[in-house]
Amino acid sequence: MIHEGSTKMDTDPVLDVRGLTVKYGDIVALRDVSLAVPRGAVTAIIGPSGCGKSSFLSVLNRLTDMIPGCEVTGSVRLDGEPIHAEAQNLIALRRRVGMIFQRPNPFPTSIRCNIDVPLRESGVRRRSERNDIIRDVLCDVGLWDEVKDRLETSAQRLSGGQQQRLCIARALALRPDVLLFDEPCSALDPISSGVVEDLIQKLRNRQTIVIVTHNLSQARRLADYVAMFWNQYGAGRLIEYGAADRIFEQPVNHVTASYVDGTVG
Amino acid sequence: MTQNRSLAGIPANSSAVERMATLVVWLGAALVTAVFLWIIGDILRHGMSGISWAFLSSAPQRSGRAGGILPVLVSTFWILIVALAVAVPVGTLTAVWLADFARRGGRLAMVVKACLDVLAGVPSIVFGLFGNAVFCRYLGLGYSLLAGGLTLACMVLPILIRALEAEFRAVPDDYRFAATALGMSRTRTVTAILLPAALPGLAVGLILGVGRVLAETAALLFTSGYVDRMPRSLMDSGRSLSIHIYDLSMNVPGGEANAYATAVVLVGLLTLINGAVLWLSDHVTRRFHGAI
Amino acid sequence: MCRSRIDSVVGGILAVVSGAACVVVALIFAFLIVDSLPAITALGVRMWTDGSWHPADSVSAGTFGMAPMIAGTIAVTLGAVALAAPLALASAVFCRYYAPGAIAAGYRRLVHLLAGVPSVVFGFWGLVVLIPILARLKPPGPSLLAGILIVGLMILPTIMLLAESALAAVPESYVLGGVALGMGRWAVIRHIAIPTARRGIVTGVILGGARAIGETMAVVMVCGNIIRTPHGLFDPVRTLTANIALEMGYALGMHRSALFVSGLVLLVIAVVMVAATTAISRYPSACCDAVV
């Protein structure tokens, strides 16, 4: 059922997922998903609610470990290394695979601390070095000019869009190999949403990105590759995967075809 | 209930700080547990041997060094009855008013709530002074079970009201809307629906109040006094279990053995009460959360 | 909202009954102030500065300086809070972030039990178990240190339970956000959970401190009760509350009034602390933004 369309995704995947199944107790959220995330590209995960998109994303940085009763089987390799290995250092993994959540979740501390604390924890000891990184990433997300005079004020006073960009900045500060976005715009107003989307556009050439989105036109604008998830027999499945152009222009699966047409879902 | 979910799944990193923190946290918990077990174990070890039917059913002799605690139990019981007989009706009515009649955020309700907060924070020895001045002297009750019970009624009022009000508020508003839609008056809604629905909460509040009364000592020193004879009426002075422990350990050389035994009785009663509260709140009051 | 007539009548009656809490608060203040007035007018500022407390006997009129007792109360309270707050925070963190579910639940239950142990039982244990141990370290045994240890243990549950519910209220998204950034367990606790829960933790510490200030029986039983400003941890002390408990039984006239003054002081402190916790919960920004 899975149709692969490009050579790029076969040669050098950052993340290689094989036979992935995720269960919450008796509920199967995701069944037998195999998918290779190509390096340096934007891969969008689309599909209706309840088809396991977010579960898929949280497997990739093993945030599923935080959910009691969640059981993950199958293999996920990051640069060839299995992330579910006994010896896997979860902290190192999460620094390599950053994540942006649906709702902006800056810590209720100052703007600077939001970036500074994870950086310090990741081992950047020198304060001047951290300050440089803070400036760089805030520039990257276009926040620097807006906040440079109030780095010590509470991050919670920022607007929703600014908060989300701060969250992206603090993820970028750790120089991750992959950035996961879990519907990063869905909790934002249209204008902030546009700003965040522009930011993802800007990052696309230097960063591997996996983005879950409800918004098909956003997927169209952003994605190099698209994975279509669908709920079949009570479990989320990957029903089609390939280059974005092909998925949107000539989908092979009729469910995908109707979904991208907007007739189902 | 995600509230009680443990977040023990956060991975630890390998730094020295992390290891230190883990060590300190586990040691802290172990220390608290050890001290607690030490206290309870010590009381039980020395006190259990003194517990017998004779101990519970006879009067103290030689200032309590020998004999039992029957009059003390009876006095404790009467103080409890007086305190609850006053506090439960007043507390229930206040809770009903706060939950269902008072305008939320209205000035009067705010004043009442502030007063309850103050009452909950007043040290028990200050209640003792107050009880002594008002009930013993001003109202002329003298050192008596009645004065002690009334003093404790003032003390448990905020505890009762908080538990009850929380329970009334936990009754789903659907019930209220439904009753209003059926043309029932608010009063009728309260008596026919809310009070029965909140009954387990009443029980929890009541038991919490009982626990507070049993544990109290300082407020009784100068209100109910510490006569250890069998009380013949509410106007007699009488000592509670807690005062008995205090007097035996501080003022009666050689009273230690019976103080231990009395402590077992008191802690046993309080543990029963604690268990009852936990059981009630686990098994009975939870049903609303499933219903909505 | 339209109300039937019966509702207005019932609501009115309930409102009047609910006023009982306010009446009690008013009476407490009134009686404490009235009974304090003779001492306040006669002795004035000497009560606060004078170091000697000698109630009247057949020879002299008596002196009523509360300074040593105030020092005692402050020392016991600060010591108890300094001891209990870190342990309580460690306990709360233990329950939320370290202990596996079953252990956390068991530990929580244990702390609930600890909270229910009456102060007289803590005092008794301190008297018969702790003080002999301290006496072997450095005589005499009954001391400021004994008071700090016992009162610290008593206020630990208050602080821990409030801190834990504050930690439980930390939005999970913050914690997950930290985890997703590769922060270790201690970093998440130290930099995210505790700062977010700061208000609840501070409230717990204030309420614990209020309880320590008002604690009477345990302090009377373990502190030695000698009226002298303490100079070391092993010195015996007498607190304001202990002074009332020890002397109220036989105090008359000016002596009684002086004891009521100390009760009034305790009452005012209690009200201030309650007001502080209310202010913290009502005006979050006032204390939060400045610190971070």
Image: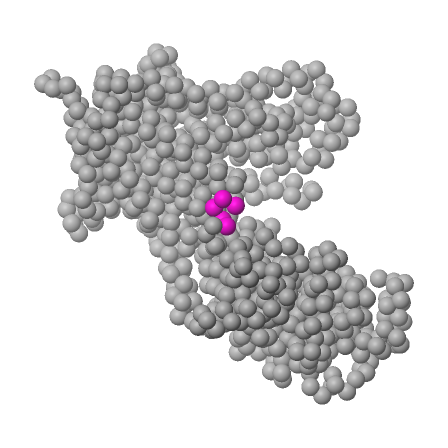
Residue B5: image quadrant is bottom right
Looking at the image, which residue is at 56% across and 43% down? B282
Q: A87 or B269: nearer the eye?
A: A87
Q: Measured from the top left, where is residue A53 in percent x and y?
A: 73, 67
Q: C4 or A250: nearer the eye?
A: A250
Q: Measured from the top left, where is residue B64 in percent x and y?
A: 24, 29
Q: Is residue C288 magenta?
A: yes
Looking at the image, which residue is at 46% across and 63% down? C186
Q: Measured from the top left, where is residue A122 in percent x and y?
A: 50, 72
Q: B231 or C263: nearer the eye?
A: C263
Q: Is residue C140 magenta?
A: no
B289 w.r.t. B161: above or below = below
Looking at the image, which residue is at 34% across and 39% down? C212
C261 w.r.t. C98: above or below = above
Q: Measured from the top left, where is residue C67 in percent x and y?
A: 22, 33
Q: Would residue B139 appear left or right of C41 to someone viewing this image?
A: right
Asked whether residue B250 is in view, the answer is no
A78 w.r.t. A168: above or below = below
> Residues in magenta?
C285-289
Q: How many marks?
A: 0
Looking at the image, which residue is at 78% across and 28% down? B181
Q: Would residue C233 appear left or right of A101 to someone viewing this image?
A: left
Image quadrant where one finds the C terminus of chain B? top right
Q: Main secondary structure of the magenta part?
A: helix
Q: Would residue C111 appear left or right of B179 to someone viewing this image?
A: left
